Image (cartoon, helix red, strand yellow):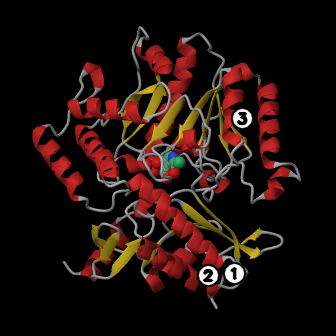
């Protein structure tokens, strides 16, 4: 079949997620930090799939682990007290990597299933303890938790909720600690504002009606918002005082992206549960889950009627075998260290090259997770409006570097194997495209 025909069939028969109508780029092959399209053109994948291909594309060790597991046991349910060795081994490893007494894992397949499960499990925990009023979930504006209906309701972007209603209730939003967006805080210190607001919401709602706060330690889709150092310790302490569970959504940040196994504890966040996905299996097999404290797990597990929540692919043996090998590859190749080292280098290079641009407002990064926030006016910090994925498309088409644009932010999240010269290529591509963009978002 020729390429033209494939493109015609794509347009005629495929409905793409998060896409606009029109032709797509057909990728035929991937290896390491690279993609090749059907015409053989090479791209540097500076987004690591969607922030998930941490050990690089088509990693031989992971392919081998998947193949060996497929041949031995391709699938068995986790329901009705069935289990399998790869799931047990992975849960044991995760207990060693996770903080404090977060020793027990509930495995699912996607990040959305995991955030959705976390909400159900936290509510169920309170219910089983007789704390039946606790149902409300607090989330952050500009937070993203997935695309299923509850995850959509918990996602703090109105444009992502439009037309999908009615959405489930029981979710309330807090202001994110986005220091660069000082207009959010009315002249007050950002952390003081956020903490005062949280205390007010607890007072208004009643602390005993709030089941959990669910938030990303670093908000990715919001534009790699890294909270100030005092923020997470203060939120954690308030949660503890009021019996509110703290759920860290580490779907993007978990398993090495920020240079730590989990970003929350590094930022002083003391979660009762961690939601993970993406980087746990580096995109080689869909896998995600909820890690929870022994206290929560024991209550949920010992309910007389058991746990009435699950999916066909919970604890998939192939996904779990791939994830265990992925964790070893991250360790053997010191990729967490590389994430901090090369991520830090890339952040420094971007700052050096872009600082003086009239449309670059802020440049943020945490390990191998970075964002460049564009403005039409540096003084007013008015977000630059550009058409859809225009800048990401130009960076891809003109420089063969894949990134994404979300609102006024360009997001960069390469595989953790990225080298310094590749970081230079990314910075150069952004510099070229940004320097030829007008303050109204059009190209020079
Ligand atoms: C923080 C966060 N949580 C949850 C999700 C949902 O994950 P998935 O797309 O695998 O359902 C995402 C996806 O990008 C995410 O960034």
Secondary structure of residue under mark 1: loop
Residue linked to disc 2 = 434
Q: Is residue 413 visible?
A: no
Residue at screen point 28% across, 29% down: 88
In the picture as drawn, the residue positioned furthest to the right comes out as 187
Residue linked to disc 1 = 357
Q: Quadrant of the N terminus?
A: bottom left
In the picture as drawn, the residue positioned furthest to the bottom comes out as 444
- Find out if the beta carbon at label 1 lies less than 8 Å from the nearest ligand 1 atom: no
Q: Position of residue 199 (x, y in %)?
A: 79, 31
Q: Is residue 275 above or below residue 419?
A: above
Q: CA distance from mark 3 to mark 2?
A: 38 Å
Residue linked to disc 3 = 234
Which sits earlier in the primary sequence, circle 3 or circle 1? 3
Q: CA distance from mark 2 to mark 1?
A: 8 Å
Frontmost of labels 3 and 2 is 3
In the picture as drawn, the residue positioned furthest to the left comes out as 71
Label 2 near label 3: C-beta < 8 Å?
A: no
Q: Nearer the viewer, residue 180 or 149?
A: 180
Secondary structure of residue under mark 2: helix
């Amino acid at each position: 079949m020729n390429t033209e025909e494939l493109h015609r069939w794509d347009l005629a028969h495929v409905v793409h997620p998060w896409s606009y109508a029109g032709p797509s780029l057909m990728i035929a092959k991937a290896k390491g930090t690279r993609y090749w399209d059907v015409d053989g053109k090479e791209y540097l994948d500076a987004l690591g799939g969607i922030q998930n291909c941490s050990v690089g594309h088509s990693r031989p060790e992971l392919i081998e682990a998947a193949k060996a597991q497929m041949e031995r046991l391709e699938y068995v349910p986790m329901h009705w007290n069935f289990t399998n060795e790869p799931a047990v081994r992975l849960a044991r490893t995760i207990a060693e990597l996770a903080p404090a007494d977060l020793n027990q894992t509930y495995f699912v397949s996607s990040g959305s299933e995991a955030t959705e499960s976390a909400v159900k499990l936290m509510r169920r925990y309170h219910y089983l303890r007789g704390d039946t009023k606790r149902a409300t979930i607090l989330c952050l504006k500009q937070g993203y938790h997935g695309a299923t209906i509850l995850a959509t309701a918990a996602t703090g972007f109105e444009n992502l909720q439009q037309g999908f209603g009615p959405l489930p209730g029981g979710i309330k939003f807090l202001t994110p600690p986005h220091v660069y967006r000082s207009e959010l805080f009315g002249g007050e210190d950002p952390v003081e504002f956020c903490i005062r607001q949280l205390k007010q919401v607890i007072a208004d709602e009643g602390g005993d009606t709030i089941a959990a706060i669910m938030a990303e330690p670093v908000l990715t889709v919001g534009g790699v918002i890294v909270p100030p150092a005092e923020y997470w310790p203060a939120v954690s302490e308030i949660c503890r005082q009021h019996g509110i569970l703290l759920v860290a959504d580490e779907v993007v940040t978990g398993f090495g992206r920020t240079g730590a196994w989990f970003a929350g504890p590094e930022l002083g966040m003391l979660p009762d549960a961690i939601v993970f996905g993406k980087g746990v299996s580096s995109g080689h097999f869909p896998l995600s889950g909820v890690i929870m404290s022994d206290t929560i797990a024991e209550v949920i597990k010992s309910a007389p009627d058991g746990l009435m929540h699950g999916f066909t692919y919970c604890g998939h043996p192939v996904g779990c075998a791939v994830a265990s090998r992925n964790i070893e590859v991250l360790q053997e190749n010191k990729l967490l260290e590389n994430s901090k080292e090369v991520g830090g280098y890339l952040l420094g290079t971007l700052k050096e090259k872009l600082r003086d641009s009239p449309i670059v407002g802020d440049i943020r990064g945490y390990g191998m997770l970075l964002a460049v926030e564009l403005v039409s006016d540096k003084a007013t910090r008015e977000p630059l409006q550009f058409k859809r994925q225009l800048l990401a498309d130009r960076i891809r088409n003109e420089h063969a570097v894949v990134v994404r644009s979300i609102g006024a932010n360009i997001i960069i999240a390469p595989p953790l194997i990225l080298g310094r010269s590749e970081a230079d290529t990314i910075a150069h591509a952004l510099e070229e495209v940004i320097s030829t963009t007008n303050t109204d978002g059009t190209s020079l």
